[in-house]
Image (cartoon, rainbow, N blue to C red):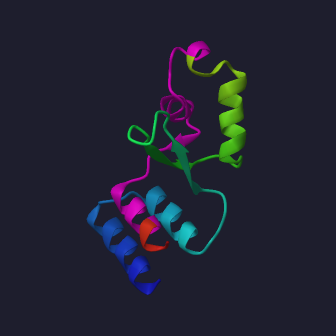
Amino acid sequence: MKEQILKIAKDLEQGTITTEQSQTLLLGLFGVNGRKFFSVEGGGDWADASVDYFINLTNRTGEEVHREYDESGGYHENGKKWFRDWVIEKGYMREPTDSELETFYDGL
């Protein structure tokens, strides 16, 4: 964990990540809920499937946010926006930086 904290501090000092991103990473390291990683599997068969990762900026679960998307009409009723584009536009989630993803994977 010490190495991860030092890496976050170095990235922040060098301007690779913002203050908000460093807070998200540090909260994640210490297991504090609030801002958390959320993944969405893309459709298609196994060869086409993909996973998008987000930082959840809400106090709601990813399932609750996805339910709102579905209840508002999903792809067709939301201006033909896929879930990933819809949540970013709404400000519910953002894409993680490379540094955040690296820290996330290191913690697995």
Q: Residue at point 59% right, 57% down? A: 36
Q: Quadrant of residue 50?
A: top left
Residue 8 is situated, as x and y percent measured from the top left of the image, at 39, 71
Magenta-colored span: 76-104
Left/right of residue 57 with respect to residue 43 in the rendered view: right
Looking at this rendering, what residue extends furthest in the bottom direction?
2
Which percent across, then down, holds residue 100? Answer: 42, 61
Residue at the extreme left of the image, as rendered = 14
Q: In this view, does 50 lie above or below 89?
A: below
Is 65 situated left or right of 28 in this image?
Answer: right
| 80 left or right of 10 in image | right
The percent position of residue 29, horizontal first and vertical second, equals: 54, 73
Q: Quadrant of residue 68 in the image?
A: top right
Q: Does the magenta stretch include residue 77?
A: yes
Residue 86 falls inside the magenta stretch: yes
In depth, the one of 31 and 10 nearer the eye is 31
Q: Residue at x 69, y 20 (%)?
A: 72
Write the residue at 34% across / 57% down: 98
- Residue drawn at 38 percent across, 65 percent down: 102
Q: Is residue 5 above or below residue 66?
A: below
Question: Looking at the picture, how far across and down is residue 33, in whole percent?
Answer: 67, 62
